[in-house]
Image (tube, rainbow, N blue to C red):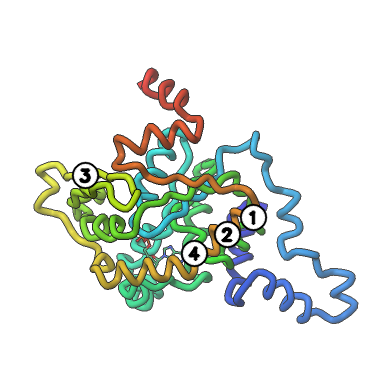
């Protein structure tokens, strides 16, 4: 069964607080003889056997980090380098908001307060995106913004293998400045950042310089700020991240899959270092040589 169908089945049971709860509910809804005879040990037990081994597919990575840390930037660069889709659940939510879909109004309210949308909605959006990709022959992925709760991480674990989790880190005061500088071009859809971060070394912390990511002239007059990039909402998103998503880091730490990466600065400083720790410098050189 395709990963998408497994995820959709997981979404159907994700309205409970956890996969374990879904498993218990499934067992208790069955007659006792069915529990022993028919109930699988895990709702996706068949899926376990059909997982594709890593050597038969492309990488399946997750990017973690506070809102605004730069997950999108690095995940999309790596996805181009490795030839895998970069799937950002925030983008899926924004696409849904821009649509006239049935969830759009309810979603807008949640997102504009910096809150998380329900696991059920997000998993449905992700499943749809994965299904489209599978139809096009995509293999592997870099997930950005998912999972954000332990429940989402458990569901993902139930349907597919995650090879590695890259956890990007940056000081919170810098993250707030970066979020407030974010702009998106209403015409081409590209992301830019007007903030120039120049923090001196203090209290034993290294200096950090991040140059702005300025748009070309033709985008300049079409820049929009996301409705959820006000200081109040950004701080709320960070608070929610610390509460809900910090445990996701612990979840993957226990599996020994986390690569911690402290961003040393902007893209020029961080990108080569990230390639170095991921052992991807050769890949980058090959790609440049082929270009
Ligand atoms: N995995 C998820 N679970 C729940 N809500 C999500 C998830 N991913 C995105 N969202 C919703 O979309 C909004 C924007 O997400 P995103 O673009 O990832 O934020 P940021 O760029 O600030 O990290 C979030 O504030 C949240 O409301």
Which x, y percent locates residue 249? 54, 58
Rendering quadrant holding ligand 1: bottom left
Q: CA distance from mark 3 to mark 1?
A: 36 Å
Query: On residue 245, which mark appears?
Result: 4
Do labels 3 and 2 touch, CB within 8 Å? Answer: no
Q: Earlier in the sequence, mark 1 or mark 4?
A: 4
Do labels 2 and 1 touch, CB within 8 Å? Answer: yes
| Residue 263 or residue 59, whichever sits in front | 263
Q: Report which residue position mark 2 lands on.
A: 250
Q: Earlier in the sequence, mark 4 or mark 2?
A: 4
Q: The C terminus appears in which quarter of the rendering?
A: top left
Do labels 4 and 3 touch, CB within 8 Å? Answer: no
Residue drawn 33% across and 75% down?
A: 113
Which x, y percent locates residue 168? 43, 49
Q: CA distance from mark 3 to mark 2?
A: 32 Å
Residue 134 in sight from this viewpoint: no
Residue 141 in the figure: left or right of residue 41: left
Image quarter for residue 285? top left
Which x, y percent locates residue 248? 54, 61
Q: Nearer the viewer, mark 3 or mark 1?
A: 1
| Secondary structure category for the residue under label 3 | loop
Query: On residue 213, which mark appears?
Result: 3
Q: Earlier in the sequence, mark 3 or mark 1?
A: 3
Q: Is mark 1 within 8 Å of ligand 1?
A: no
């Amino acid at each position: 069964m395709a990963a998408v169908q497994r995820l959709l089945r997981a979404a159907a049971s994700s309205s409970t607080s956890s996969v374990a709860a879904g498993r218990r509910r499934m067992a208790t809804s069955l007659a006792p003889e069915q529990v022993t005879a028919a109930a699988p040990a895990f709702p996706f037990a068949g899926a376990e056997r059909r997982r594709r081994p890593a050597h038969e597919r492309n990488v399946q990575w997750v990017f973690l980090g506070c809102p605004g840390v730069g997950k999108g930037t690095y995940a999309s660069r790596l996805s181009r380098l490795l030839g895998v889709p970069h799937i950002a659940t925030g983008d899926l939510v924004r696409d849904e908001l821009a649509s006239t879909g049935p969830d759009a109004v309810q979603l807008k309210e949640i997102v504009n307060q910096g809150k998380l949308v329900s696991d059920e909605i997000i998993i449905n959006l992700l499943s749809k995106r994965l299904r489209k990709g599978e139809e096009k022959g995509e293999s592997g992925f870099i997930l950005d913004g998912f999972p954000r709760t332990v429940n989402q991480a458990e569901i993902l674990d139930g349907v597919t293998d995650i090879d590695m989790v890259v956890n990007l880190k940056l000081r919170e005061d810098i993250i707030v400045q970066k979020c407030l500088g974010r702009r998106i071009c209403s015409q081409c859809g590209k992301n830019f950042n007007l903030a120039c971060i120049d923090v001196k070394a203090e209290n034993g912390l290294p200096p950090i310089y991040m140059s702005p990511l300025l748009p070309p002239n033709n985008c300049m007059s079409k820049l929009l700020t996301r409705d959820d990039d006000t200081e109040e909402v950004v701080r709320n998103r960070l608070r929610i991240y610390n509460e809900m998503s910090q445990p996701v880091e612990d979840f993957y730490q226990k599996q020994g899959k986390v690569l911690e990466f402290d961003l040393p600065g902007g893209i020029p400083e961080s990108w080569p270092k990230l390639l170095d720790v991921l052992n991807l410098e050769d890949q980058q050189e090959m790609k440049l040589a082929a270009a």
